[in-house]
Image (cartoon, rainbow, N blue to C red):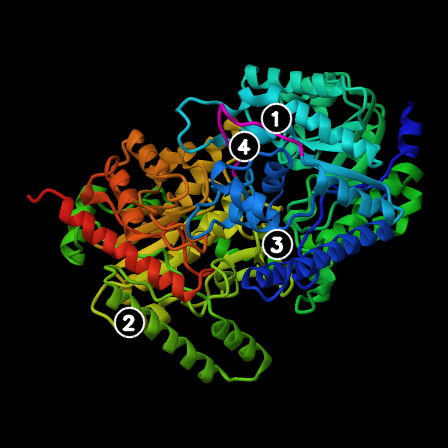
Amino acid sequence: MTAQSAAAAARATVYGYPRQGQNRELKKAIEGYWKGGVDADTLRATAADLRRANWRHLAEAGIHEVPTGDFSYYDHVLDTCVMVGAVPERHRAAVEADALDGYFAMARGTQDVAPLEMTKWFDTNYHYLVPELGPDTVFTADSGKQVAELKEALALGLTARPVLVGPVTFLLLAKPAPGVAAGFDPLTLIDRLLPVYAEIVADLRAAGAEWVQLDEPALVQDRTPAELNTAARAYRDLGALTDRPKLLVASYFDRLGDALPVLAKAPVEGLALDFTEAAAANLDALAAVGGLPGKRLIAGVVNGRNIWVNDLEKSLATLGTLLGLADRVDVAASCSLLHVPLDATAERDIEPQIRRWLAFARQKTTEIVTLAKGLAGGTGTIAAELAANRADLASRAGSAITRDPAVRARAAAITEADARRSQPYTERAAAQRAHLGLPLLPTTTIGSFPQTTELRTARADLRAGRIDGAGYEERIRAEIGEVISFQEKTGLDVLVHGEPERNDMVQYFAEQLTGYLATQHGWVQSYGTRYVRPPILAGDISRPEPMTVRWTTYAQSLTAKPVKGMLTGPVTMLAWSFVRDDQPLGDTARQVALALRDEVNDLEAAGTSVIQVDEPALRETLPLRAADRPAYLAWATEAFRLSTGGVRPDTQIHTHMCYAEFGDIVQAIDDLDADVISLEAARSHMQVARELAGHGYPREAGPGVYDIHSPRVPSADEAAALLRKGLEAIPAERLWVNPDCGLKTRAWPETRASLKNLVTAAHTIRTELPTS
């Protein structure tokens, strides 16, 4: 096909779409089902309505081929576990008794059975459930969900493409099941898994699929020759099937590197590649392998992970370069639109001109359609759209809100000494022990306590004017008093104020810093039914006034025990926001760090002796390619130290991380130079404690003994057993006792019971320790 005919064939498509609905209808239906107020048929009907609404919107916007199978009640990797029969033995009875309840049990656990481990989806804030596999795993095909959703879309008269997690990525994401001997590699199961995928794609073909998309984002990471050979063999075998649809292999989030020639040579009909700035090397690499003659290329030129309007002319130039490198070039976002909010036009509180800089899922869909039209018909067919786009880009570039000379001057004056504590850890630790007087195995929580319906109602009433500021503050004071009283009665050693005034650990701070924009409806799925509203980082950052001092000092006035000050760290403030794309991330991180430094210093001056600066996103934001990591970790760890480097030696600095693969960043954790770190460890059975010990981590650590992402209450014996595992790696004088994460999403009854058991476990283990 000539470049001209390839352009004429250009079509618009997407890989996935937000699942929740305009008003988070899916979240409400699922949580209603869990509470018994919504039955299974109503939940299924709500989900079907949302799928149909998404497909119709996409089709009406001009998307030529809609995705199916990307919709999920909880997580698409969990859906894949069900699709290939990878159900852990402990969950089989529940799944066989009731497929829906068993599915949620795998995700959330029950009082008697632990859930699957959960971690971050590559370098995003989306969490997936980790498949558990072993040498005895037997895969079986269950294409019911995929076939049913394809038929729903076809019944609407739409062209539809089922989207599956690819077999290589599925195995690379998996972990050995509990009890499986160390050293087992799930990728060795590829020969068992491929026949199951063959059966599923055949079922989809029989149901009317012309194309099936197999997502292989794991191939954008550094892969060994053996892993690449496995990928080559997998697609050689799937490509050799006779009864199958056309196969499209998709990658995203970064460049493919050595995997690109492997997939280019594979006997599949198409590839989908990321051509945004993060993966710009894909273009040169594609040309180097001779392109994709005879194949379809879907070009991801619209950023599917950030919310700024696309530079249409730049994207058209990229698309034009790609013509001639494939038999057909289609246009898409760089990844699923799951990672952005639904519709920017709903943000009525953002000034209209600024709102024109923003592109959520619906606006990105329009951009994709516009680019496909321009590629097929020439720029004259989209002249008006190009002119409007140029005006929007110029408006943002010239806006005064993007640059603050005072902030930039302060950042430029940073010295190396600013990012260092005044004394080494050994001297600080002695000063802190003398100052705080804590017992061995001190107990604490991560920060937040349950956000009750009453608290959310109070915030809504304040916004709506149904109560005044004084009434709202009275409610917050009462909640803090209850939280402090409970912690004292339970016997916790280092207390928190519970964060009742905070809507979200990032949004709360963003609303008090210059340079940030807050949304009202910009919900994005984090995991399951947990949705967040990432703020938008639009300009230079500063802190006009203290943000947390007032409530922290009020809580401290209610108790003689130390109360932690609670802040969100600079990397997490970036990772869980939509960041500006007009300057290096490290520059923005330093601005946030300086604002937080002011807050840390004010907390200390007000008498706060323990200050926690959370960095749960440090691992999440780690570049997918090893070559890119040193530069990132250098500015990321510097930003944390810049936030915390100005305090006295006897002020104890904590940090917190959760739901990530910590083994990749143990040296970076060390480089933070925090006095105490708390980490998720319950679902992974203290794996992180062993990783810290293997590194020789010299400071204090609290690997979690209470999985807060499950409604089950861990017994005191269970928590004590985890503590004993922790003590095998970390000596008692450096081991803390805490939950995995904050308690915001939990209910009070389970929180009370779990924390009482946690304190009991700590007391039990203290009696087992040798006396000096």
The image shows residue 418, relative to residue 468, as above or below, that is above
Q: CA distance from mark 1 to mark 4?
A: 9 Å
Q: In the rendered structure, which segment of residues is drawn in magenta?
A: 130-141
Label 2 vs 4, first from the N-terminus: 4
State the CA–CA distance, disc 2 to disc 4: 43 Å
Task: Specify the farthest residue to the left.
Answer: 772
**Picture quadrant where residue 402 is located:** bottom right
Q: Residues within 10 Å of mark 1 (few under 14, many from 20)?
A: many
Q: How far apart are the alpha carbons under marks 3 and 2? A: 35 Å
- Label 1 sits on a secondary structure element that is helix
Q: Which mark is residue 684?
A: none
Pointer 4: what residue?
173
| Residue drawn 79% across the image and 42% down it | 150
Which residue bears the numbered disc 2?
485
Which residue bears the numbered disc 3?
524
Please identify, in this view, whether the residue under mark 1 or under mark 3 is nearer the observer.
1
Q: Earlier in the sequence, mark 1 or mark 2?
A: 1
Q: Quadrant of residue 726?
A: top left
Compare residues 748 and 207 and report the one nearer the observer: 207
Asked if the stretch drawn in magenta spans residue 489, the answer is no
User: Could you tell me the amino acid type at mark 3?
Assistant: Val
Q: Which residue is mark 1?
A: 168
Name the amino acid, label 4: Leu
SS at badge 2 = helix
Q: Position of residue 680 (x, y in %)?
A: 39, 45
